[in-house]
Image: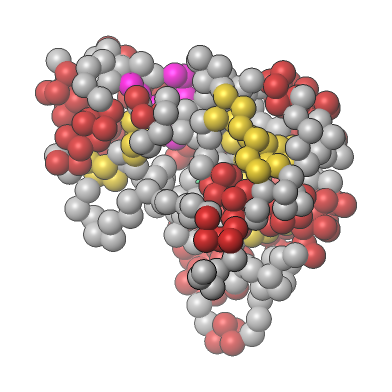
Amino acid sequence: MGYLRKTIEEARGYVPGEQPQDASYVKLNTNENPYPPSPKALEAARTTANEWLRKYPDPLANPVREVVAKLFHVTPEMVVCGNGSDELLAMAVRAFVDPGTALATSDPTYSLYETLASLHGAELESHSCKEDFSLPVDELAASKAPLVVLSNPNAPTGVAASADDLATIAGSIPGVLLVDEAYVDFADEDAMALARSEENVLVLRTLSKSYSLAGLRFGFLVGPSKLAAGIMKLKDSYNCDRLSIATAEAALQDQAYMQKNVAKIRQERQRLTEELRKLGFDVPESRANFVFARPPKGTAGELYMQLKGRGILVRYFDKPRVKEYVRITVGTPDEVTTLLTELVSLFE
Ligand SMILES: *Cc1c(COP(=O)(O)O)cnc(C)c1O
């Protein structure tokens, strides 16, 4: 017998995408934004790196809660800030899921949900997406799980469910619906109205993708103040630090800069989708900053290796169904062109 609790011993930890710490690859594997963060955010980070770092930060990250409240027409009491949205997902599992009960989600989806359930000693109640990767809405609506977590747009497919479908699910489940909107700024619709009107809906956002701040670690949850207050009880006292609070506040205030980058990425997403389809790839319509693409011949695993050999990193998941596809982050026009040139040489 080892020293670890059985739940931990048996859990599979989360396996992140490759993060080479040099710039030798065209890195299209972990959905980072190819553009730099807002200059105003970087300025805030620099000016906050001062003697005040000897003091603890605001425990609730109130400056950010206030900006979020204004942006989304909610009150600061409805906002919980976290050290990346991954931390907020872990907090939601602890807040709503008794060990032994289940976390419900779709399959495929972000594999961290499964990891968090297993670390918590909870079951994973997994509902298969349809053939076109759309959500099994009726099945999810019938779930009795205390927490249903849906990534929307979904990872790794990029496919988005409508706000109406999410409302249907929220309206019929006994538990909480948490909509992980990591990619929603690249989409056409969001579920923030549900977080305002429903007593069991939480919306999760991150600054890692659309705001180009994956290295900062900042996310926030929005939803009914009762749920927010409950989650806050199990938060580490100072989960967000002074630098991240100031930087996140400035980044969120600079909506114009974020939207400008989002527009460029959406345009490249369209070009990449069209060119991949011309080469014979199957590409579900993506509403995120990546595309999910099944090669016309050979396996996706081989394609991943071939591209890596040519200095291009994409994401490959060796799991049923998704293993037929690679997930490609939408980069700059130059990066997309580099990728397409290699793909033309392989598939044309
Ligand atoms: C990237 C991603 C996150 C993680 O966000 P962080 O704020 O960087 O922790 C959460 N959910 C999904 C679906 C993601 O793809």
Q: Is residue 262 magenta?
A: no
Residue 284 on image: x %, y % = 44, 19
The magenta-colored residue range is 284-294
Residue 196 on image: x %, y % = 82, 39
* Total count of labels: 0
Q: Is residue 196 left or right of residue 115?
A: right
Coloring scheme used? secondary structure
Residue 199 on image: x %, y % = 86, 40
Above or below, 300 against 1 in this view is: above
- Choose top left, top right, bottom left or bottom right for residue 29: top left
Residue 316 on image: x %, y % = 33, 36
Question: In the displayed image of the protein, which residue is found farthest to the left?
Answer: 345
Q: Is residue 322 left or right of residue 6?
A: left
| Residue at horizontal 42 percent and vertical 51 percent from the top | 15
- Choose top left, top right, bottom left or bottom right for residue 343: top left
Which one is in front, 144 or 252?
A: 144
| Residue at horizontal 47 percent and vertical 28 percent from the top | 157
| Residue at horizontal 65 percent and vertical 53 percent from the top | 121
Give the quadrant of the C terminus: top left
Which one is in front, 100 or 244?
A: 100
Above or below, 110 against 100 in this view is: above
**In this orientation, does residue 42 appear?**
yes
Q: Main secondary structure of the magenta part?
A: loop
